[in-house]
Amino acid sequence: MSDQDKSRSIKNSNLTQVSSLAKANISKPIAIIPARGGSKRLPRKNVLPLAGKPLIAWTIEAALESGVFDRVIVNTDDQEIADIAIQYGAEVPYLRPSELATDTATTISVLKHQLEYYLSHDEVFDQLVLLQPTSPLRTAQDIRNAWELYCDHAIESVVSVTPVEHPIQWTFKADENAKLSPLFDDALKRSQDCEQHYRLNGAIYITSSINILEHDILIHPLSNMGYKIPANRSIDIDEELDFVIAQSVLTHYSKYTD
């Protein structure tokens, strides 16, 4: 199914689940923190010590401190990660099957498996919040604010974003001979004259379980809002340099995480 067809299908099914929630009476969501044991660019990154505690601990503690969640779940295939998660107060109901721990396994498939596990045990969660452990500077207040944004509006999804570091008008593509061609007509426009754009920062995703189980989406294409997090709290640890930057910020420049 094409993206257009998927959007049309979702639209045709309408937003009845949102309007029927009467968001003032919405139940607490479940937090899911996916943490795979294998990581090629930064081996064992989820358990690496960051400013005195394992990387994953920063997200677990923020989730618990937020007071938003009914349950804080770590989804992992790795026993060491599971042990650390439990030590810091999260639940690990099972170890992720190996087929969902590969480089090609999708986040949606992991979330769907988690929700289906609970359904098989007669537990239903209407909403879920995905918190990636690679965003250690996202705070408990960020989580509360994003959840309030979701509850206060008749929308299907909230996702955290941060300002794009450089104007998208400065983007070029290169051919096989390294010749550059601008993607926009105003490639030489001054940065102060450019409209502000935002990118996903990977820290917070909020949506209904229906969107995961029935539509395979985290961000509803027709009904969403962005929760803005400044760049100083939007470090996404993907490789060693990211880790070094986060370590430096947390160790020497903690005022920049406020």
Image (cartoon, helix red, strand yellow):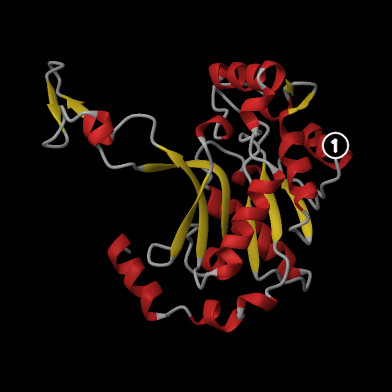
Q: Position of residue 49 (x, y in %)?
A: 75, 21
Q: Position of residue 43 (x, y in %)?
A: 63, 21
Q: Position of residue 95 (x, y in %)?
A: 75, 46
Q: Is residue 4 visible?
A: yes
Q: Is residue 207 visible?
A: no
Residue annotated with mark 1: 83
Image quadrant holding the N terminus, namely bottom left
In this view, the residue in front, 156 or 120, is 156
Residue at x 60% of width, y 51% of height: 110
Residue at x 63% of width, y 47% of height: 142
In this view, the residue in front, 84 or 191, is 191
Residue at x 60% of width, y 59% of height: 112
Q: Amino acid type of disc 1?
A: Asp
Image quadrant holding the C terminus, namely top right
Which quadrant of the figure has residue 251? top right
Q: Is residue 166 left or right of residue 147?
A: left
Q: Position of residue 189 (x, y in %)?
A: 17, 30
Which quadrant of the figure has residue 120? bottom right
215 up-or-down from 69: above or below: below
Residue at x 68% of width, y 32% of height: 37
Which quadrant of the figure has residue 182? top left
Q: Residue furthest right?
A: 87
Q: Is residue 155 left or right of residue 169?
A: right
Say how many tags the image has. Answer: 1
